[in-house]
Image (cartoon, grey):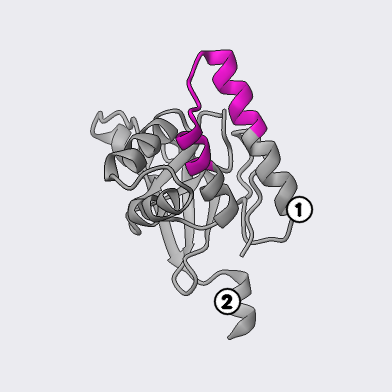
Amino acid sequence: MTRETSPVPADEAAPVGFHKHDHAVCVESALAAAETRCRDEGLRLTPVRRKVFEMLLQEHRALGAYAILDRLREAGYGSQPPVAYRALDFLVANGFVHKIERLNAFVACAHPGSAHSPAFMICRLCDAVAEAQSAPAKGALGAAARSVGFEIERTVVEAEGICPDCSEKA
Protein backbone atom coordinates (compact mmCIF):
# COMPACT_ATOMS: atom_id res chain seq x y z
CA MET A 1 0.00 0.00 0.00
CA THR A 2 1.45 3.34 -0.94
CA ARG A 3 0.68 6.90 -0.02
CA GLU A 4 1.91 10.15 -1.53
CA THR A 5 3.54 12.48 0.99
CA SER A 6 4.55 15.54 -0.96
CA PRO A 7 3.21 18.81 0.40
CA VAL A 8 -0.11 19.95 -1.05
CA PRO A 9 -1.60 23.42 -0.60
CA ALA A 10 -4.07 23.48 2.28
CA ASP A 11 -6.94 24.51 0.00
CA GLU A 12 -6.76 21.38 -2.14
CA ALA A 13 -9.42 18.89 -1.13
CA ALA A 14 -8.17 15.85 -3.07
CA PRO A 15 -7.14 12.99 -0.80
CA VAL A 16 -3.50 12.04 -0.69
CA GLY A 17 -3.10 8.30 -0.65
CA PHE A 18 -4.02 4.95 -2.09
CA HIS A 19 -2.08 5.45 -5.32
CA LYS A 20 1.29 4.42 -6.72
CA HIS A 21 4.25 6.78 -6.60
CA ASP A 22 8.04 6.84 -6.33
CA HIS A 23 8.33 5.75 -2.71
CA ALA A 24 12.05 6.51 -2.32
CA VAL A 25 11.56 10.06 -3.57
CA CYS A 26 8.57 10.65 -1.31
CA VAL A 27 10.44 9.52 1.81
CA GLU A 28 13.58 11.44 0.87
CA SER A 29 11.72 14.67 0.06
CA ALA A 30 9.60 14.54 3.24
CA LEU A 31 12.70 13.99 5.40
CA ALA A 32 14.54 16.83 3.65
CA ALA A 33 11.56 19.16 4.14
CA ALA A 34 11.37 18.24 7.84
CA GLU A 35 15.09 18.83 8.31
CA THR A 36 14.87 22.21 6.56
CA ARG A 37 11.86 23.29 8.60
CA CYS A 38 13.49 22.21 11.86
CA ARG A 39 16.67 24.10 10.99
CA ASP A 40 14.72 27.23 9.94
CA GLU A 41 12.51 27.21 13.05
CA GLY A 42 15.16 26.15 15.57
CA LEU A 43 13.54 22.78 16.23
CA ARG A 44 15.65 19.74 17.11
CA LEU A 45 15.08 16.78 14.81
CA THR A 46 17.09 14.38 16.96
CA PRO A 47 18.19 11.02 15.55
CA VAL A 48 15.33 9.25 17.37
CA ARG A 49 12.72 11.74 16.13
CA ARG A 50 14.08 11.47 12.59
CA LYS A 51 14.04 7.67 12.76
CA VAL A 52 10.42 7.58 13.98
CA PHE A 53 9.36 9.98 11.21
CA GLU A 54 11.25 7.89 8.65
CA MET A 55 9.54 4.70 9.88
CA LEU A 56 6.11 6.27 9.48
CA LEU A 57 6.98 7.58 6.02
CA GLN A 58 8.25 4.16 4.93
CA GLU A 59 5.19 2.29 6.17
CA HIS A 60 2.46 4.42 4.60
CA ARG A 61 0.09 3.15 7.24
CA ALA A 62 -0.54 3.95 10.86
CA LEU A 63 1.77 2.39 13.45
CA GLY A 64 1.12 2.10 17.17
CA ALA A 65 3.61 3.40 19.71
CA TYR A 66 4.69 -0.10 20.74
CA ALA A 67 5.30 -1.16 17.13
CA ILE A 68 7.44 1.96 16.77
CA LEU A 69 9.22 1.15 20.03
CA ASP A 70 9.98 -2.39 18.80
CA ARG A 71 11.49 -0.99 15.60
CA LEU A 72 13.50 1.59 17.53
CA ARG A 73 14.88 -1.18 19.74
CA GLU A 74 15.83 -3.23 16.67
CA ALA A 75 17.61 -0.16 15.28
CA GLY A 76 19.54 0.33 18.53
CA TYR A 77 17.65 3.36 19.90
CA GLY A 78 16.53 1.92 23.24
CA SER A 79 13.53 0.02 24.50
CA GLN A 80 11.85 2.29 27.05
CA PRO A 81 8.36 3.58 26.11
CA PRO A 82 9.27 7.22 26.82
CA VAL A 83 11.75 7.06 23.92
CA ALA A 84 8.95 6.48 21.40
CA TYR A 85 6.39 8.70 23.12
CA ARG A 86 8.71 11.72 23.36
CA ALA A 87 9.56 11.43 19.67
CA LEU A 88 5.88 11.07 18.74
CA ASP A 89 4.89 14.02 20.95
CA PHE A 90 7.43 16.23 19.15
CA LEU A 91 6.39 15.03 15.69
CA VAL A 92 2.66 15.49 16.40
CA ALA A 93 3.13 18.89 18.09
CA ASN A 94 5.03 20.17 15.07
CA GLY A 95 2.67 18.76 12.44
CA PHE A 96 4.96 16.11 10.97
CA VAL A 97 2.74 13.26 12.21
CA HIS A 98 -0.96 12.81 13.04
CA LYS A 99 -2.55 10.51 15.59
CA ILE A 100 -5.26 8.26 14.20
CA GLU A 101 -7.65 8.02 17.14
CA ARG A 102 -9.57 4.94 15.93
CA LEU A 103 -6.38 2.93 15.62
CA ASN A 104 -4.55 4.58 18.54
CA ALA A 105 -1.68 4.85 16.08
CA PHE A 106 0.31 7.43 14.16
CA VAL A 107 0.78 8.30 10.49
CA ALA A 108 3.12 10.73 8.72
CA CYS A 109 1.38 13.95 7.66
CA ALA A 110 0.69 14.19 3.94
CA HIS A 111 0.58 18.01 4.11
CA PRO A 112 3.47 19.04 6.37
CA GLY A 113 3.97 22.72 6.88
CA SER A 114 0.38 23.70 6.09
CA ALA A 115 -2.22 24.50 8.70
CA HIS A 116 -5.06 22.11 7.95
CA SER A 117 -7.80 19.94 9.36
CA PRO A 118 -7.07 16.47 8.08
CA ALA A 119 -9.68 13.85 7.29
CA PHE A 120 -8.45 10.28 7.30
CA MET A 121 -9.75 7.39 5.25
CA ILE A 122 -8.74 4.13 6.92
CA CYS A 123 -8.94 0.79 5.15
CA ARG A 124 -10.54 -1.69 7.54
CA LEU A 125 -8.81 -4.59 5.78
CA CYS A 126 -5.18 -3.47 5.53
CA ASP A 127 -5.08 -0.39 7.84
CA ALA A 128 -3.74 1.80 5.02
CA VAL A 129 -4.47 5.47 5.66
CA ALA A 130 -5.08 8.27 3.16
CA GLU A 131 -5.21 11.90 4.24
CA ALA A 132 -7.51 14.52 2.71
CA GLN A 133 -8.16 18.13 3.59
CA SER A 134 -11.30 18.84 5.56
CA ALA A 135 -13.07 22.11 6.29
CA PRO A 136 -15.27 21.32 9.30
CA ALA A 137 -15.96 24.98 10.06
CA LYS A 138 -17.52 25.39 6.59
CA GLY A 139 -19.70 22.26 6.57
CA ALA A 140 -22.59 20.96 8.62
CA LEU A 141 -20.45 20.70 11.75
CA GLY A 142 -19.40 24.33 11.38
CA ALA A 143 -22.98 25.44 10.92
CA ALA A 144 -24.07 23.52 14.02
CA ALA A 145 -21.21 25.03 16.02
CA ARG A 146 -22.01 28.57 14.86
CA SER A 147 -25.69 28.12 15.73
CA VAL A 148 -24.79 27.60 19.39
CA GLY A 149 -21.89 30.06 19.50
CA PHE A 150 -19.22 27.35 19.64
CA GLU A 151 -15.79 27.99 18.10
CA ILE A 152 -14.18 24.86 16.66
CA GLU A 153 -10.45 24.73 17.41
CA ARG A 154 -9.61 21.18 16.39
CA THR A 155 -11.37 18.28 14.71
CA VAL A 156 -10.49 14.68 14.00
CA VAL A 157 -12.32 13.21 11.01
CA GLU A 158 -11.83 9.50 10.42
CA ALA A 159 -13.74 7.39 7.92
CA GLU A 160 -13.47 3.62 7.77
CA GLY A 161 -13.95 1.67 4.56
CA ILE A 162 -12.08 -0.31 1.94
CA CYS A 163 -9.15 1.10 -0.08
CA PRO A 164 -8.88 0.65 -3.87
CA ASP A 165 -6.23 -2.10 -3.60
CA CYS A 166 -8.34 -4.19 -1.23
CA SER A 167 -11.46 -3.57 -3.36
CA GLU A 168 -9.63 -4.85 -6.43
CA LYS A 169 -8.51 -7.98 -4.56
CA ALA A 170 -12.06 -8.77 -3.38
Residue 95 vertical placement versus 40 (above, below)? below
| Residue that extends furthest to the left in the rendered view of this protein | 148
Q: Is residue 7 visible?
A: no
Residue ranking furthest to the bottom: 170
Toward the front, the furthest residue is 76
The residue that appears at 39% across and 39% down in the rendered structure is 88
Judged by its main secondary structure, the magenta piece is helix
What x and y, as percent, mark residue 40? 59, 14
Q: Residue at x 59, y 33 (%)?
A: 10
Indicate yes or no whether the magenta region holds residue 16. Answer: no
Residue 73 is left or right of residue 1, and the answer is left
Mark 2 crowdedness (10 Å alpha carbons): few <14, some 14-19, many ≥20: some
The residue labelled by disc 1 is 22
Report the quarter where the C terminus lies: bottom right
Circle 1: is it few (<14), some (14-19), or many (20+) Cα within 10 Å? few
Residue occupying the point 60% across, 26% down = 35
* Lateral position of residue 141 relative to residue 119, left or right: left
Q: Quadrant of residue 103?
A: bottom left
Residue 38 colored magenta?
Answer: yes
Q: In this view, does 40 lie above or below 111?
A: above
Q: Where is residue 82 in the image (x, y as percent from the top left)?
A: 28, 39
Q: Nearer the viewer, residue 113 or 25?
A: 25
Residue 46 horizontal/vertical position (percent): 48, 28
- What's drawn in magenta, residue-wise? 32-53
Residue on which disc 2 sits: 166
Mark 2 or 1, nearer chain start: 1
